[in-house]
């Protein structure tokens, strides 16, 4: 018996055998393997377009500076107690360590913000949070020229709007047919291009 032929027959069930080449171009990810992606999920559950949220240099500087201040404060308290025990209350050291750790987690989530268009919906991600709207629930897609300063940054509750804000710029507004949140606001890199890709995928 031909060993090579036997192995091919035994692996005929494997989706990797018939997988087409995956293309990465301009943050667009395409792949297919008999309707199943490499993750084992149906193809329409995986992103056909994905982009990272844009950040201004000023907001990067402010957020990183905040972490540096907290980390420096904890380092000062830690090494201060090593040099002179009892100089800084032990509870203060724990509070500073907790604050620095929590700040680092929030900072990681904020800078990991991204937006996806899948085969059947649109997703906004800011770890550990993710919000998804199926195409069937989208009522309208429009833009907002500027997000007010009081809304803030990150994942924000703005009335019955849910906003993923990375910077002050024109943003995508996705209006829903139903649900508590009636609008999803995304500060994408290029709001017009994102809307174009979203409408193309919906048709």
Image (spheres, grey):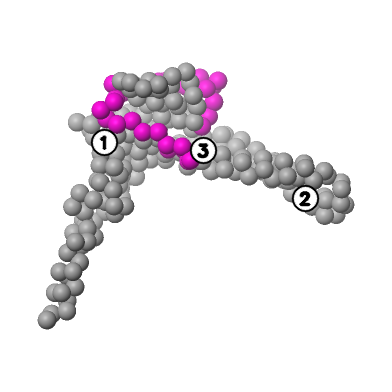
Give the camera-side residue of 64 and 92: 92
Q: Residue 147 at what x, y percent from top left? A: 47, 22
User: Pointer 3 and pointer 1: residues touching (CB < 8 Å)?
Assistant: no
Q: CA distance from mark 3 to mark 1?
A: 25 Å
Dot 3, crowdedness within 10 Å: few (<14), some or many (≥20)?
many
State the image coordinates of residue 83 (x, y, percent, origin top left).
Answer: 85, 54
Whole-Å distance between the Cαs marked 3 and 2?
28 Å
Query: Which residue does the image show at 40% across and 33% down from the upper left?
Result: 131
Residue 103 placement (x, y as % from top left): 61, 40
Res. 55 mark: none
Q: Secondary structure at mark 3?
A: helix
Of callouts 1 and 2, the N-terminal one: 2
Horizontally, residue 20 falls left or right of residue 77, namely left
What residue sits right under mark 2 in the picture? 78
Label 1, on which residue?
120
Q: Earlier in the sequence, mark 3 or mark 2?
A: 2
């Amino acid at each position: 018996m031909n060993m090579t032929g036997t192995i091919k027959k035994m692996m005929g069930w494997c989706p990797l055998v018939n997988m087409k080449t995956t293309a990465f171009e301009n943050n667009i990810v395409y792949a297919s393997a008999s309707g199943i992606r490499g993750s084992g999920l149906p193809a329409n559950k995986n992103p056909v377009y994905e982009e990272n949220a844009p950040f201004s240099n000023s907001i990067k500087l402010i957020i990183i500076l905040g972490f540096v201040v907290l980390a420096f404060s904890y380092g000062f308290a830690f090494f201060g107690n090593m040099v002179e025990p009892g100089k800084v209350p032990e509870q203060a050291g724990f509070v500073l360590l907790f604050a620095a750790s929590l700040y680092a987690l929030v900072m990681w989530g904020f800078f990991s913000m991204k937006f996806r268009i899948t085969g059947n919906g649109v997703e906004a991600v800011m770890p550990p949070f993710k919000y998804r709207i199926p195409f069937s629930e989208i009522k309208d897609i429009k833009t907002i020229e500027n997000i007010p300063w009081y809304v803030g940054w990150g994942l924000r509750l703005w009335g019955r709007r849910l906003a993923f804000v990375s910077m002050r710029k024109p943003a995508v507004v996705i209006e829903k047919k139903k649900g508590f949140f009636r609008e999803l606001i995304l500060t994408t890199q290029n709001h017009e291009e994102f809307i174009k890709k979203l409408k193309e995928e919906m048709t």
